[in-house]
Image (cartoon, rainbow, N blue to C red):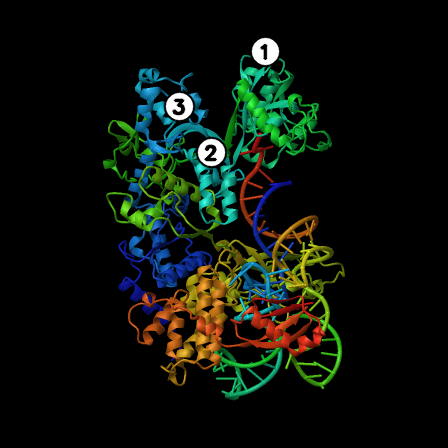
RNA sequence: GCCCCGGUGGUGGAACUGGUAGACACGCAGGACUUAAAAUCCUGUGACCCGCAACGGUCGUAACGGUUCAACUCCGUUCCGGGGCACCA
C-alpha cells in the first residue's frame, strides 16, 4: 500500500469541513489562545508560494496549542476594501464587488488546498455591510470623543462641552493650533462665558479641533493618478506606495484621525509587547519623539515674535542665523523692503519644486529676509533667512541655526558666508558641525564652563523664568489622513448641514455603499459618490462623499473574529474579555508603521471607552520573511556586427555569453575583426527550467509557440539560464503556485518544505529543488506503517528502551522547536526520528502513535489518516500531546570524551546524572589522565554540559 | 549620513545560556537491486597532510586583534550584504 497523498488529503479536508472540526466555541473550560494572521487583501493574482509561509507557521502553532489543551481561536478573513481593489476593478472593467468576491472565492480554494485549521464560520470581510457597520460605529465613537490630556485617555465630547460651559478651555487648550486659520482670531482661548456666547457653528468648529476623528483643512498628500489623498505611510520617497505615482502637497478639507494624541502611549506600549527590536524601532522612529524647547525671539523693528523649536537650547550662544520655512505666512510680514524681490522669487522657486525634487536633490538654497531676531541673552542681532530645508510641518516651522553644532547649519553658513561662532572650542574643527553634547561651553556667557548636556536644563529653566519660552516635546508623527476620494471603501456616517458635520445616529447604520457602475471621480476632486445626487441628499443635508481608507477595517478586525455574527455590538464584552489579546500575530514587516500603529491606537481608544479590557491588541508579533522569486533568463542574440539584426529567435546559453569564438563560428566571420553581438535577456518561466537547465522543448511550446522555431547555442548539450533574485511576480515569470506543488507532492510535503526552508522570520529566494527530500521523508514515514510487498507492517509489540529513547528524545525536541518557532529544525527532528526508527525496524504502534500526534501540526493530513488507520476515531487534534519521560533520556550511559587542555582525549562511561564529585573521582583514575598529570594536581576539573570534561593544570 | 539585522561546506541551513562546528536536507560521486528506467536502499562528501590502518595530525565559521582552560557565540576595529529612516532642528 503506497502513500496516496492526493486521496488522503482530499478525504481529510472534506472530513474536517463536514464535521466542523475547526469550529471554535467562545464557551470553553480550556484556557484560550488566539493565533492570528494578518488577513490578506484578495488580489486577482492569487496566492504564490510566498503568501502561505506565515499561514503555515501560524497553523502549525495553532494546532500545536490545541494539542496542548488550549481553546484556540485561529480565524481568517479578507481585507477587501481599499485602493488596490478599486484599481484592479477599473483596470479589468469589473465592478470591485464582483472582482473582490471572485478573488476571495479563489483565495479560499487555494487556502483550503493547503489544509489550514481556520474556523471559516468566523470569516470576516471588511467590505461586508455587516462588518463595516461597526467600522462606521467606531468612527462615530471617535468623532464623539476627545483626548483628555489630564486623565490621559479618550472621553466623550459631551464631557468637554460640560467643561467648556464651566471653565472655558483654560485647562484644555486646543491640541493642534495649526488649524488656527479656520477659526477667527483669538478664538483659541475662551472662558465659560465666552463659550456660551458663541453661536452653534463656532462651537462646532471649536469642538472639531478636539474630536479624535475630525475634519480639517490641511496639507495632504494628493496623488493625481490615483485621484485621492494618501496617508504619510502610503507615500514612499515622494511617490505613492501603490503604483509609484507622483504625490504632491495640496491643501484640502480632509478627515483625520487624531493619532498624535496617542503618540506617547503608543510609544510606552511598545515596552509591554513582544515585538522584534527592529519592529519596535521602526515604530518609535515613526512616532519620532524629541524633547527640547520652544523659544520666542524678538524681531528687530517688528512687534511679532519668531518662535523656534530646538532640542539644543544649550547652544543658544552659537546661534548665527535663523531659518524660517518658506511656507510660513510670517515670511511676508518680516521681509524687508530691500529683500522683497529676492524673497518673492525664492518663494516662487520653492513652490515650483515638487516634493520629489526636494527629496532627490538636496541643494543648499535660501535667501535672507532682511530682518533680524534678537538673542534674548546678549541682545545680539541674528539674521533671519528662509530656506526649504526647514519644514513647515515640524515644530514651529522655524529653527535657530548653530553652524558649529549642526552639519546642515554648517553647510548653509559656509554656502552663504555667514560668520560662525564657535562655542565648543576644540570640538569644532572648522570643517564640519559637531553635534556633540559632551563639550564644555565657551563664548556662552552664563553657560561658560558647563558641559552641554547639563546646560540644556539650565537654559530651559532660565527661558521659562523669563517667560520667553517653554519646555516642549515634539513628534514627527502627524495625524493620519482618514478620507479617500474613492468609491471602494466605507462611507462616512456623516452628513453636512451647511458647514457643520453632523454624525448620523447609530440606528442609521450601516450607511451602505450604494452600487455604482461608473467609478469616475466627482467634481472638485471629490470621489465618485459625489456623482450620486439622489444618494447624497439625506435628511435635508448632504452626505459626506469621501470614503474611509483601507486601514479602517483592518484597525479592529481582530476583535470581530471573537464575535462575528453579533448584530447588536461590534463585539460583545463577554467575547472580548474571554479572548483578550491576540497571543500571537504573524505578518510581514511592511505593516510596521501603518496597520500596526492604527490598530494599536484603535485598541487603546476602545479600551479608554471601556468597550474592551486590554489596551494592546497583540501580545507577541512575529514577522515572517519575504519569499523572493528566483528568476531565470534566456539570452536572445538580436544582432551581430557581422550579420546585422537577427530576426530568427536565437538563444545562447549563459556560460557561452562571452564565448566569441563559438559565436564567430556560428556566423562564419570573414573579417577577422572582433565580432560584436548584442543579446537581450528575456525572463523565462521558472516552471520550465530545472534548476538552471532550460527544458528546450517546453520552451518552444511556451507562450503559445512564440519561440517554436528557436535555435540554441548550447553548452555540454544543455541550455543554461542566467539567474537573478527579484520580487516574486507574474510579470517576471518567477511565481510558483502552491497548488501545483500540492498537486505534485501533496499539501503535507508543501507545508513541511516551506518550513524546512529556514527560519520563518528570514527572507529568502524560493527554490523548489529540495522539496524531494521532504517528500521522501513522508514516504519513509508511511513505510513504517505499510510495506509495498507485505502491506501492513505496524504491530502492537512492546517497544524497547532504545525505541522509546528515540521517541522521547523526539517529543522533547519537537516541543521545544515548536514552542520557540523553530519549525525548520522541527522538520529535521522528525527526519532524524524516522531515520532512526527505520534503522531499528521499529513498526510498533506504541511508538508510532505518539509520533503521529507530534507530527499532526506539521503534516495534518497524513497524521489524521494514519491515526485513524491505527484504530482511533475523531480528530488527532483532540489527542493529548505526549509527555516526554526523563527516564528514557538519561538512562543509557554513553562514552564521553575527556579533553585535557584541548589536547589529549580518552573516553569515560558515566551516568548522565553523575555528580561533580563522581566525575572527578573517575577522571582522576583514568589512565591517560594520570599519565598526563605526571603526579601533579589539576587546578580544576570542569564538567560541562556536552558531557565533556576539562582538566586544567 | 544615522539606526537595526546578518556574513558558517558546492547549496539551503543546524549548533538555544561560550563546551566535540557543519545536525537535517539538497546536490555531487561511487555502489546494490533492475533487461532498462523510475522508485528504494547503502557508502562517501569542509580543506589540507600522513598512512597498512585510524575512533591519526594541521587548518577552518568575512578579516584582524582581544578576553577565556575553551569563542560561530563575548569585546574592539575593518570589510561586505540586507532592511529601516533620511533635511524632523
In this rendering, the answer to whether A437 lies above or below A943 is above
Residue, disc 1: A301
Residue, disc 3: A171
Residue neighbourhood size for the residue with mark 2, other residues' Cα within 10 Å, grouped as few (<14), some (14–19), many (≥20): some
Mark 1–mark 2 distance (CA, rounded to whole Å)? 35 Å
Dot in front, 3 or 2 = 3
Could you say whether the residue bearing mark 1 is in a helix, strand or loop? loop
The image position of residue A680, as x and y in percent, is 61, 56
Picture quarter with the C terminus of chain A = bottom right
Residue neighbourhood size for the residue with mark 3, other residues' Cα within 10 Å, grouped as few (<14), some (14–19), many (≥20): few
Q: Which of disc 2 and disc 3 is earlier in sequence?
A: 3
Mark 3–mark 1 distance (CA, rounded to whole Å)? 34 Å
Could you say whether the residue bearing mark 2 is in a helix, strand or loop? loop
Residue neighbourhood size for the residue with mark 1, other residues' Cα within 10 Å, grouped as few (<14), some (14–19), many (≥20): few
Q: Do callouts 1 and 2 point to residues on the same chain?
A: yes
The image position of residue A864, as x and y in percent, is 35, 70
Picture quarter with the N terminus of chain A = bottom left
Judging from the image, mark 2 belongs to the subunit labelled A
Q: Quadrant of residue A150?
A: top left
Q: Which of disc 2 and disc 1 is earlier in sequence?
A: 1
In this rendering, the answer to whether A382 lies above or below A31 is above
| Rendered residue at 47%/51% (across/down) | A588
Residue, disc 2: A478
The image position of residue A270, as x and y in percent, is 46, 43
In this rendering, the answer to whether B87 lies above or below B65 is above
Amino acid at each position: 500500500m503506497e502513500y496516496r497523498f492526493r486521496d488522503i488529503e482530499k478525504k481529510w479536508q472534506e472530513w474536517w469541513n463536514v464535521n466542523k472540526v475547526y469550529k471554535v466555541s467562545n464557551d470553553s473550560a480550556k484556557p484560550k489562545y488566539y493565533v492570528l494572521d494578518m488577513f490578506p487583501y484578495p488580489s486577482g493574482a492569487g496566492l504564490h508560494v510566498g503568501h502561505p509561509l506565515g499561514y503555515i507557521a501560524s497553523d502549525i502553532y495553532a494546532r500545536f496549542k490545541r494539542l496542548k489543551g488550549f481553546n484556540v481561536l485561529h480565524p481568517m478573513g479578507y481585507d477587501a476594501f481599499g485602493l488596490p481593489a478599486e484599481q484592479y476593478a477599473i483596470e479589468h472593467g469589473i465592478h470591485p464587488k464582483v472582482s473582490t468576491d471572485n478573488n476571495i472565492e479563489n483565495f479560499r480554494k487555494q487556502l483550503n488546498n493547503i489544509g489550514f485549521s481556520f474556523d471559516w464560520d468566523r470569516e470576516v470581510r471588511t467590505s461586508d455591510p455587516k462588518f463595516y457597520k461597526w467600522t462606521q460605529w467606531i468612527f462615530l465613537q471617535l468623532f464623539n470623543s476627545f483626548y483628555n490630556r489630564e486623565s490621559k485617555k479618550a472621553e466623550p465630547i459631551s464631557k468637554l462641552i460640560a467643561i467648556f460651559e464651566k471653565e472655558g478651555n483654560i485647562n484644555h487648550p486646543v491640541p493642534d493650533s495649526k488649524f488656527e486659520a479656520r477659526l477667527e482670531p483669538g478664538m483659541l482661548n475662551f472662558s465659560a462665558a465666552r463659550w456660551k456666547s458663541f453661536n452653534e457653528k463656532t462651537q462646532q468648529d471649536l469642538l472639531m479641533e478636539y474630536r479624535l476623528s475630525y475634519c480639517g483643512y490641511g496639507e495632504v498628500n494628493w496623488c493625481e493618478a490615483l485621484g485621492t489623498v494618501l496617508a504619510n505611510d502610503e507615500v514612499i520617497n515622494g511617490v505613492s506606495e501603490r503604483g509609484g505615482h507622483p504625490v504632491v502637497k495640496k491643501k484640502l478639507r480632509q478627515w483625520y484621525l487624531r493619532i498624535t494624541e496617542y503618540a506617547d502611549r503608543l510609544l510606552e506600549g511598545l515596552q509591554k509587547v513582544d515585538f522584534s527590536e527592529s519592529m519596535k524601532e521602526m515604530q518609535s522612529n515613526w512616532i519620532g519623539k524629541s524633547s527640547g524647547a520652544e523659544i520666542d525671539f524678538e524681531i528687530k523693528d517688528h512687534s511679532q515674535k519668531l518662535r523656534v523649536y530646538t532640542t539644543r537650547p544649550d547652544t543658544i550662544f552659537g546661534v548665527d542665523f535663523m531659518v524660517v520655512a518658506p511656507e510660513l505666512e510670517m515670511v511676508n510680514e518680516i521681509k524687508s523692503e530691500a529683500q522683497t524681490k529676492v524673497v518673492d522669487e525664492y518663494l516662487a522657486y520653492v513652490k515650483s519644486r515638487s516634493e520629489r525634487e526636494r527629496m532627490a536633490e538636496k541643494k543648499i538654497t535660501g535667501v535672507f529676509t532682511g530682518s533680524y531676531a534678537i538673542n534674548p541673552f546678549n541682545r545680539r542681532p541674528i539674521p533671519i533667512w528662509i530656506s526649504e530645508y526647514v519644514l513647515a510641518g515640524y515644530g514651529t516651522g522655524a529653527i535657530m541655526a548653530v553652524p558649529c553644532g549642526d552639519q546642515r547649519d554648517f553647510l548653509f553658513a559656509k554656502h552663504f558666508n555667514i560668520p560662525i561662532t564657535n562655542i565648543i572650542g576644540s570640538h569644532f574643527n572648522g570643517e564640519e558641525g559637531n553635534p556633540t553634547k559632551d563639550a564644555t561651553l565657551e563664548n556662552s556667557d552664563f553657560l561658560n564652563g558647563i558641559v552641554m548636556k547639563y546646560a540644556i536644563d539650565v537654559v530651559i529653566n532660565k527661558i521659562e523664568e523669563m517667560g520667553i519660552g517653554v519646555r516642549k516635546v515634539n513628534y514627527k508623527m502627524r495625524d493620519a489622513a482618514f478620507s479617500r476620494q474613492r468609491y471602494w471603501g466605507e462611507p462616512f456616517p456623516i452628513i453636512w448641514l451647511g458647514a457643520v458635520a453632523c454624525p448620523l445616529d447609530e440606528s442609521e447604520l450601516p450607511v451602505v455603499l450604494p452600487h455604482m457602475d461608473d467609478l469616475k471621480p466627482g467634481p472638485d476632486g471629490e470621489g465618485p459618490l459625489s456623482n450620486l445626487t439622489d444618494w447624497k441628499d439625506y435628511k435635508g443635508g448632504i452626505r459626506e462623499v469621501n470614503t474611509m481608507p483601507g486601514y479602517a477595517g483592518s484597525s479592529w478586525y481582530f476583535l470581530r473574529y471573537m464575535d462575528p455574527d453579533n448584530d447588536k455590538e461590534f463585539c460583545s464584552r463577554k467575547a472580548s474579555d474571554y479572548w483578550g489579546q491576540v497571543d500571537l500575530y504573524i505578518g510581514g514587516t511592511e505593516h510596521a508603521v501603518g496597520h500596526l500603529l492604527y490598530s494599536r491606537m484603535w485598541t487603546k481608544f476602545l479600551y479608554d471607552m471601556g468597550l474592551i479590557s486590554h489596551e494592546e491588541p497583540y501580545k507577541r508579533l512575529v514577522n515572517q520573511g519575504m519569499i523572493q522569486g528566483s528568476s531565470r533568463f534566456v539570452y536572445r542574440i538580436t544582432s551581430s556586427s557581422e550579420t546585422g539584426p537577427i530576426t530568427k529567435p536565437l538563444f545562447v546559453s549563459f556560460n557561452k555569453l562571452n564565448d566569441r569564438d563559438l559565436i564567430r563560428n556560428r556566423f562564419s566571420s570573414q573579417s577577422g575583426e572582433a565580432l560584436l553581438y548584442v543579446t537581450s535577456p528575456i525572463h523565462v518561466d521558472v516552471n520550465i527550467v530545472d534548476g538552471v537547465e532550460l527544458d528546450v522543448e517546453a520552451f518552444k511550446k511556451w507562450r503559445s509557440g512564440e519561440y517554436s522555431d528557436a535555435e540554441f547555442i548550447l553548452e555540454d548539450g544543455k541550455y543554461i539560464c542566467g539567474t537573478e533574485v527579484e520580487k516574486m511576480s507574474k510579470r517576471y515569470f518567477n511565481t510558483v503556485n502552491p497548488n501545483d506543488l500540492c498537486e505534485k507532492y501533496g499539501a503535507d510535503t508543501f507545508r513541511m518544505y516551506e518550513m524546512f526552508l529556514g527560519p520563518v522570520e528570514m527572507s529568502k529566494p524560493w527554490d523548489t529543488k529540495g522539496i524531494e527530500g521532504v517528500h521522501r521523508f513522508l514516504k519513509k514515514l508511511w513505510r513504517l506503517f505499510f510495506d509495498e510487498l507485505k502491506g501492513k507492517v505496524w504491530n502492537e509489540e512492546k517497544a524497547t528502551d532504545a525505541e522509546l529513547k528515540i521517541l522521547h528524545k523526539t517529543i522533547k525536541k519537537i516541543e521545544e522547536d515548536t514552542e520557540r518557532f523553530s519549525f525548520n529544525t522541527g522538520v529535521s527532528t522528525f527526519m532524524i526520528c524516522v531515520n532512526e526508527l527505520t534503522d531499528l525496524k521499529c513498526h510498533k504502534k506504541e511508538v508510532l502513535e505518539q509520533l503521529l500526534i507530534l507530527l499532526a501540526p506539521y503534516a495534518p493530513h497524513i497524521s489524521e489518516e494514519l491515526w485513524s488507520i491505527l484504530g482511533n476515531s475523531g480528530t488527532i487534534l483532540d489527542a493529548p500531546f505526549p509527555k516526554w519521560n526523563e527516564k528514557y533520556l538519561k538512562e543509557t550511559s554513553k562514552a564521553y570524551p575527556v579533553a585535557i587542555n584541548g589536547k589529549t582525549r580518552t573516553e569515560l562511561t558515566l551516568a548522565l546524572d553523575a555528580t561533580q564529585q563522581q566525575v572527578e573521582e573517575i577522571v582522576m583514575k583514568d589512565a591517560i589522565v594520570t599519565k598526563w598529570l605526571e603526579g601533579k594536581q589539576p587546578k580544576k576539573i570542569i564538567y560541562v554540559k556536552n558531557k565533556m570534561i576539562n582538566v586544567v593544570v
